[in-house]
Amino acid sequence: MSLNLAVILRESAFARPDKEAVILHPFRLTYAQLDALSNQVASSLRDRGLQVGEKVAIMLPNVPQFVISYFGVLKAGGVVVPMNVLLKAPEVSFYLSDSGARVLLTWEDFAGEAMKGAPAGVTTFVVNRPGSDAMPEGALSFNELLAGSATFDLEPTNPDDTAVVLYTSGTTGKPKGAELTHFNLYMNCTISGGLFGFRDDDVGLAVLPLFHSFGQSSVMNVSLRYGGTISLVPRFEVPAICEAIQRDRVTVFSGVPTMYFALLHDPQVAGYDLSSLRVAVSGGASMPGEVMTTFERKFGVTILEGYGLSETSPTASFNQSLEDRRFGSIGKRIWGVDMKIFDEEDSPLPAGKDHVGEIVIRGHNVMKGYYNQPEATAEAFKGGWFHSGDMGYQDEDGFFFIVDRKKELIIRGGFNVYPREIEEVLYAHPAVQEAAVIGVPDERLGEEVAAVVSLKAGQSVTEEDLIAFTKERVAAYKYPRTIRFVDSLPKGPTGKILKKELKQQLEAGAPKG
């Protein structure tokens, strides 16, 4: 039996060739055009000697060429290595060397840094901005890959062959490449789309980076699997998001909590018609309850929160509907996936809020391992379960709740403090827009609780008042002893707050605003 993830595009193109598949205003591609263009890339790569199983790195923003390239590589039997467009030369060098990629596809604006880091022997193709024909020395134009045949049969691959090597964020040490199979990704987009209630007349907004697991699997692949339309937005800016939703009649919005915060608090939103939205999906980080209820009330759309990791393709659990969700929960395990709570001896814990342990996962969504890292793979799969590094508990009805990252746990004088619990309290203060709670070194206690906060426009509160507000609502050992105010919190490409960076700033002195 063979399975190539690119079948999701091929089948939708066969069923609805004239349907719009991708929009980046004013540019539009039908399914037939997208299928043909990705065939041309596949054909050209094979003509240039790409072998089945060889890696091709894609360092592109949310533009049509990302979608074309992704499926072109898969059709050719290659393995996609998605890369953050903001990587610097040493990081590019690591990703390409570690994965063994021999071809790099990148965007004109990032080509200089990419080529500076590319090891010898890597062929670089550059996608130009509209109207530009600039080409760095030694690079080839992406247009050369579009000179191949528009008809190309899918290269047969096995379900457990690697389709994508997705590098994790690397919160400790160097990033690791999670090997996701054709079956992992096919099942995850199929089941996720069903949970979203995705239909062929839906328009999904792709503002989450497609090089990230959430944007790639839950937005791009879901939309193409169900024959919908992808509305691309290359970077998160509130007016651009609102224009796309209004213009393209977007029905499904997927984002991380910081995107919801921005839409909730930006006064420019009032000038747009966002009534086409039918469902909103949140993941990547826990959404404070106050933000969720306020957003739903303001925009009249239900937010369904899910959970997963790069290593789980990504979705592992989900709140399936307004009727079948639990406030503050990451939902129930998805079909075909097992999730449990293990203690430190890897024994299952019973249900209940008092039984906090590590979330472990196994099922069709879990990667085959970390690329060329057998020791890290063995450590992650102790006892046959993937160990997530996330701490949580399960209630009696099967809903899972995240308490915090295992590595972000603060141990203050022997007491465990879970940052998310304190952040929820801070978000409930009317002046607070964003908050992050971090453990900082303390000679007496080992670690002390600190918070970094940004305020809503026009709001003010003192450090003393905010500490007092928190102190009234949590145990004495939990409340932050210091609060630093900043204009905005540092965020990664998906909008996730970068706690590692904040921790470094706090330990070095006052964080930068």
Image (cartoon, rainbow, N blue to C red):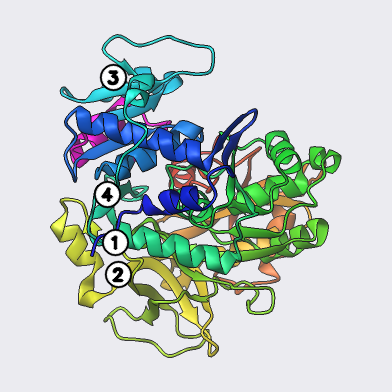
Q: Are marks 3 and 1 in contact (CB under 8 Å)?
A: no
Q: Secondary structure at mark 1?
A: loop
Q: On residue 367, which mark appears?
A: 1
Q: Which residues are magenta?
A: 82-103
**Near-viewer residue (116 or 280):** 280
Q: Quadrant of the N terminus?
A: bottom left
Which disc is residue 197 wearing? none
Q: Secondary structure at mark 4?
A: strand
Q: Which residue carries the number 2 mark?
A: 386
Callout 3 amino acid: Lys
- Inspect the magenta stretch and tell me whether residue 122 lies in it: no
> Do the numbered discs 4 and 3 sit on residues whose CB atoms are within 8 Å?
no
3D distance between C-alphas at marks 4 and 3: 22 Å
Q: Which of 417 and 52 lies nearest the eye of the viewer? A: 52
Side of 508 relative to 263 (left or right) = left
Q: Secondary structure at mark 3?
A: helix
Residue 226's spot in the image, x, y percent?
53, 57
Residue topped by disc 3: 116
Whichever of labels 1 and 2 marks the residue nearer the N terminus, that label is: 1
The local crowd at label 3, few if under 14, some if 14 to 19, many if 20 or more residues have their Cα within 10 Å, is: few
Amino acid type at mark 4? Gly
Amino acid carrying label 1: it is Met
Q: Is residue 308 visible in this depiction of the protein?
A: no
Task: Give the Cα separation between the discs numbered 2 and 4.
Answer: 15 Å
Image-quadrant location for residue 152: top left
Q: Residue at x 21, y 41 (%)?
A: 99
> Label 2 amino acid?
Phe
Q: Position of residue 420 (x, y in %)?
A: 55, 64
Q: Looking at the image, which residue sits at the far right?
A: 271
The residue under label 4 is: 177
How much space separates mark 3 and mark 2, taking CA atoms?
36 Å
- The answer for how far apart the CA atoms under marks 1 and 2 are is 9 Å
